[in-house]
Image (spheres, coloured by chain):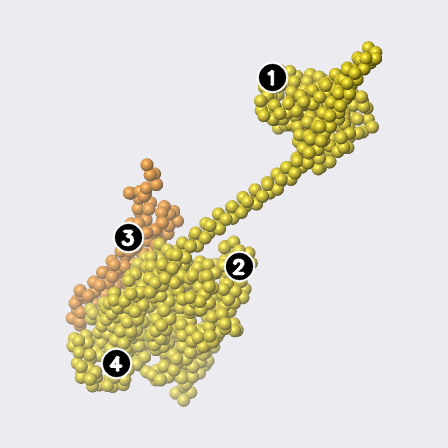
Chain colours: A orange, B yellow
Amino acid sequence: MNERRTPLFLERQSYRRRRLIDMVRMLPVIGALLWAVPLLWKSGPDSDISTSVAIIYLFGVWLGMVLLSAVLARLLKSADEHPQESDD
Amino acid sequence: MATLNILVSVCLIYVTFLFAIAFAAERAARQGHGGWLRSPLVYTLSLSIYCTAWTFYGAVGYAARSGLEYLTIYIGPSLVMVGWWWILRKLVRIGRSQRVTSIADLISSRYGKSNLLAVGVTILAVIGTTPYIALQLQSVTLSFSVFSESHVPPTELLDQDSTALWVAMGLALFTILFGTRNLDVNERHHGVVIAIAVEAIVKLFALLAVGAFVVWGVGGGLAETLQRIDASEIGKWEMRGDRWASLIFLSAAAFLCLPRMFQVMVVENDRESHLRTASWAFPAYLMVMSLFVVPIAVVGLDLLPKGSNPDLFVLTLPLATGNEGLAMLSFLGGFSSATSMVIVAALALSTMVSNHIVMPIWLSATGGGAKISGDVRNVVILSRRISIAGVVALGYLYFRLSGGGTALASIGLISFAGVAQFLPVLLGGLFWRGATRIGAFVGLTVGFVVWAYALLLPSFGSGALISEAVMLNGPFGISWLRPQAFFGIEGMDPLVHAIVWSMSLNTLTFFVASLIGFPSPLERLQGAQFVNVYEHSRRPQGWSGSAAQSEDLMIMAQRILGAREAQTLFEREAGRQGVTGFLPEPSPDFLQVLERELSGSVGAATAHAMIGQIVGGASVSVEDLMAVADETAQMMEYSNQLETKSEEQARTARQLRQANEKLTQISVQKDAFLGQVSHELRTPMTSIRAFSEILRDSNKLSAEEKVKYSSIIHDEAIRLTRLLDDLLDLSVLENGQVNLNMQRGMLMDVLDHAVSSALTGSTGKPLIVRRQRSQEMVPLNSDLDRLSQVFINLIGNAQKYCVADAPELAISVGINNGELVIDFIDNGVGISKDDQAVIFEKFARVGSMKAGGAGLGLAICREIMARLEGSVSYLPGQGGAAFRVILPVSQAAAAE
């Protein structure tokens, strides 16, 4: 008859927020992996990868991280403005 | 020479501008409308002190030498920022909740407020930062000399040393002015922050301008520039994987551990939500900063003569193409980078040096605690100022001694590797409750020894500080201890070698020593506080304040926080405890608050020590804490109970006193009554006896006389009967044995009857009764006989006691609040206040016994009205005596 049990399933909004935080947590891992990709490239004067390609790749990852992070920050902000329950 | 003069004046104008901005910001913050000072944008820009002159000039040189490796320095921090949810969020939360003032403060605070650890971290931070400050001074003097070389004959060359000296002095002055202006509890420096935010914009703009000029002005567009890059010396991907990975790690670690980064990121942080914005905005800043580095390097390598210093391409490229305005802007960018770094680094280091080295020494030298005389606040500020000057002077000295040569250029990464040694202790402290002070101490020591031995000392050149023989064969011929080939593993890049070994040995020893040791209660407490910072926003109590003297604490706090601030704090806390005045009880709670406030000014360890001295006891064990908390709760409960009880008792005492007064009065009345009643009984009895004796003994009485005497006997008997009837009546009423005879009738009839009955046979002055018959048409359902008895009594009293020349009685009827109210008001002198209290008591009679009667009338009235669920009371302030009879409306309305 205890009506104040903790819910087994969260409300939709807080569920979303938690998954959002999961994504925020995951982002640096993804970034580290993507930036580790150059380790696989053949190095040296006879490399297939020219510096311009490397620049475009590395900065592309960078830009992607920034944009994704900005979107997540915005989403997190709007999720925080309608909080359903306390954070973790 | 003209250009140089312009350069100097531009520099001065720029510096003046910075001073003005910092001043305006401080002013706005003081006046309370500095909301814009604490925007996420300013926070993000202030983080840009990560990009020093080493970035501004050095990145291009780095790229010219090693290709894209320079990016690692910016990728690491970007990852840390993007991953803010992991570490930075916690760091900032802890920094705010513990009022941390520096990284040394954080580490010492986490590991049981150990000052030894704080001193260690401070010294290491100074060692790690001094070369870096020297590097900044060098870059400014170099860029000055670039300008002067191209415009003046060598004979008029500016003395490099004097330039560096002027710059160093200016920076120290700025930092002292705006960094120690206020000894704020939360150590925020709005002026400094806003100045470095402006400098962040200047350096970004300058680098972008040079970059755009190089790509579109010299390089001929984006595509051409890319082709040019591929065709250059660094056109192919040439990278050592180990360096790539370990440098990204290193820069990320340094980003977290650099004292200056900690200062802007944690200490100056105003709101946690700013981190959310900075999480993407700062990586974006870093990305833009490093965007044009390779094009500038490649074009510089192309255009400038062989052998020119690639570290200065940012400056020399615009100069070589005759773009002096751009060169000037670029110079300002470099100047900004250097100055902002020196300012913040000096600020951060001075806080550490002053809080953890100077203050403890000064306190122990002067006896410390409450006994010290003079204003500690001034001492703290003075020690900060001296520390700032000292740190900058150290940087200048290093610059002079190292000769400002190329040896400095490599110092950036070495310095990074040095401060990165804080990382295991820092992260261990944040995430692992088992981390202990001993572990931290061992780990840090091992890490720094390895760093110094494997990286710092060899960096001065083989044979300079470490002999060639040691480098080749190891110390004392122990080959597995060779500085650049630990355990005989050769062929590693020296930097990677040093990073790998220092970090891993540091972490390992930290871990193992933590496992073996056993932490003190305070450490465990702080550990739980740090690791579970999200669960406990509050700190548990660390002091048992029974011995502490509030006044001593007040004296000490005034000296550190300033008199006004301390008084405000104490008053607030006293208010919170419910104590009036300025001195709260030295409860553990209050001591905790006070310690935190003090730690904002002098650091956690010193604040802890100072309070410890006054409180007397050292910190207490967890068990003690729990006992104290328990005891306090019990005492509070007990005192609450006592308070309630004492209130109750006061109430009871009051009631008892009243009752006693009444009893005394009643007793007096009773005595009076007994006298009266015996008198009343005795008088008729006497006459009855006398006359009956006459009737019995005398035979010569006429019939007339017999009748007269027997009537007297009869009358007296009736009087006795009436008295006894009254007593009986009252007794019956009081015992509740009366049977009410409920009848319907009109109030007017009842009053008519009462008036006529009461006035019948009256002998005194005639009483005029004034009535308003129209209001008396109220139907009743009540015991009309009893009610009538009450009215008769009241009217009779008026008749008997009204002393006016023309006695009048006004009877008014009204409905008030649903009750029938009947007032009997006469025009006599009324009843005195003392008598009012007793007239309804039995046997009470007002004043002298002028009129006969046992004094039972009103008592009977009251009892009757109580039975009828109404009341009769004295109505004061009506001119004469006034009685109010109230009947519940149910009895009035029931008849309708």
Residue holding disc 4: B458
Q: Residues within 10 Å of mark 3 (few under 14, many from 20)?
A: few
- Tell me the subunit letter for badge 3: A
- Tell me the subunit letter for badge 1: B
Q: Please name whichever residue, B180 or B889, is drawn nearer the observer in this view of the structure.
A: B889
Q: Is residue B123 above or below residue B567?
A: below
Residue holding disc 3: A22
The image quadrant that residue B82 belongs to is bottom left
Residue shown at the point (65%, 38%) measured from the top left: B664
Residue A56 in percent (x, y) is at 25, 63
Residue holding disc 1: B741
Q: Residues within 10 Å of mark 4 (few under 14, many from 20)?
A: many
Q: Is residue B605 above or below residue A68?
A: below
Q: Nearer the viewer, mark 1 or mark 3?
A: 1
- Tell me the subunit letter for badge 4: B
Verify CB contact (< 8 Å) between mark 3 and mark 4: no
Q: Nearer the viewer, mark 2 or mark 1?
A: 1
Spatial CA distance of label 2 from label 4 is 58 Å
Locate residue B180 relative to residue B745 in the image: left or right. Answer: left
Verify CB contact (< 8 Å) between mark 1 and mark 3: no
